Image: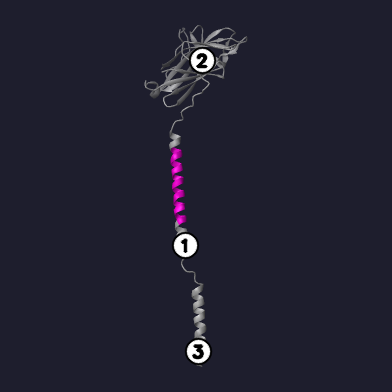
Amino acid sequence: MKKTMSLLLAMAMVFTLAACGSDPAPSGDNADVSELQARIDELEAENAELREQLENVSAQVPTVPTPNPDAVDAAMGTPYTIDGLVEFTVNYADLKKEVLPPNPDSYYTYYAEEDGMTYLDVAVSVKNLRTTDRLADEFLSATAICGDGYEYNGFSVIEDDNGGTFTYTNITNVAPLETAVIHYLISIPNELADDTSVGITLDLTMLDSYEYTISVR
């Protein structure tokens, strides 16, 4: 009987030890890995937030145009010739609240003041050197660059009846060797136009290919 009881106690101890051995003990390595993963998740969230903030700041910073290295520094009142195509002179580039033809007729077209805006009136004399008529709107386009890179575009009109009125450039031909005066009108916010400390540069493109830069102020 004593031998049987001893045998049963021994077997019970073996099973107890086996059961204890089957339970996983807490691992210090696993705790370290969990802590490291939590820190990685935290850093990724911070990086995502910083990227979003950087994108918002970048969107608010105006893009400063890169100067065209091939553009010619031009001056008002100086004639320029593109051989066989056109001879032109920038007569003036003036800031105006409204634009009237130089010699208003009894009935004329003009451009009234726009709320909060000022016109940059760029007057260019063009002489057609080609052997055929050319539409007036083919000769030039312009962009005004103000202050820290604010860009403004406009539209062109042409003087008619010896400066008595304006008409549309897209319906008016310039004959061979004829000289016409084209006005390119660009609307600029008063905030920039009225501040004399703000520089204004004119990027003038002739015949879609020839670039000129003119300092307005």
Q: What SS does tag 2 mark?
A: strand
Does residue 29 show up magenta in the picture?
no
In the image, residue 100 lies at what x, y percent?
44, 12
What label sits on residue 5 in the rendered view? 3
Identify the secondary structure beneath mark 3. Answer: helix
Q: Nearer the viewer, residue 199 or 14?
A: 14
The quadrant in which the C terminus is found is top left
**Spatial separation of the CA atoms under disc 2 and disc 3:** 118 Å
Mark 2 surroundings within 10 Å by alpha-carbon count, few (fewer than 14), some (14 through 19), many (20 or more): many
Identify whether 52 is placed above or below 20: above
Q: Which residue is mark 2?
A: 157
Q: Which residues are magenta?
A: 36-56
Q: Amino acid at mark 1?
A: Asp
Residue 203 coordinates in the image, percent (x, y): 49, 20
Residue at the disc numbered 1 = 29
| Colour setting | one colour
Please provide percent x and percent y for residue 154.
49, 21
User: Residue 126's mark?
Assistant: none
Report the label total.
Answer: 3
Q: Earlier in the sequence, mark 1 or mark 3?
A: 3
Q: Are marks 1 and 3 in contact (CB under 8 Å)?
A: no
| Pointer 3 local density, CA inside 10 Å: few below 14, some 14–19, many at least 20 | few
Q: Earlier in the sequence, mark 1 or mark 2?
A: 1
- Pick whichever, 107 or 18, lies toward us: 18
Hey, what amino acid is under mark 2? Val
The three-letter amino acid code for the residue at tag 3 is Met
